[in-house]
Image (spheres, rainbow, N blue to C red):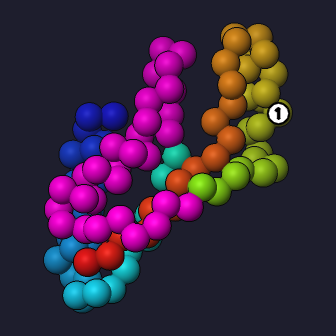
């Protein structure tokens, strides 16, 4: 996750550099799990974009439906006692 956040920081900087003033950038991001614990990757990405100068205009929660691997994860969520991460965040940033 640490390496991903460093790389997404480069993306955020470049998006900020090329985007015109008062225009928007949208990022769709979900959370992840490590060793059975939820890691709030999406909100870390939101923080990274804020740190380069973007303002958060909207946070839209997108529910996930009919994913190819849902059956596999539903079975394992019962077996290993965890809830499915059934949503993603669509962050809309303004420069």
User: Which residue sits furthest top?
Assistant: 80
Report if residue 10 is visible in the image: no
Q: Is residue 26 left or right of residue 22?
A: right
Q: Quadrant of residue 84?
A: top right
Judging by the rendered image, the residue that carries numbered circle 1 is 71
Q: Nearer the viewer, residue 18 or 50?
A: 50
Mark 1: secondary structure: helix
Provide residue 80's location: percent of width, then percent of height. Answer: 69, 11
* Residue 34 counted in the magenta span: yes
Residue 9 place in picture, x, y as percent: 22, 54
Q: Please give the range of residues in magenta.
A: 31-60
In which quadrant is the N terminus drawn? Answer: top left
Residue drawn where x is 28% and y is 50% of the image: 47
Query: Residue at 26% across / 78% down in the picture?
Result: 95
Q: Mark 1 packing: few (<14 Cα in 10 Å), some, or many (20+)? A: few
What residue is shown at x 32% (from left), y 76% (from top)?
94
**Residue 87 magenta:** no
């Amino acid at each position: 996750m640490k390496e991903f956040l460093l790389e997404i920081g480069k993306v955020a900087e470049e998006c900020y550099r090329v985007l015109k003033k008062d225009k928007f950038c949208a990022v769709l991001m979900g959370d992840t799990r490590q060793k059975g614990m939820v890691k709030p990757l999406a909100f870390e990405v939101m923080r990274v974009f804020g740190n380069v100068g973007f303002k958060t205009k909207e946070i839209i929660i997108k529910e996930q439906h009919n994913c190819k691997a849902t059956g596999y994860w539903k079975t394992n969520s019962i077996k290993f006692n965890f809830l499915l991460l059934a949503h993603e965040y669509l962050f809309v940033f303004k420069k």
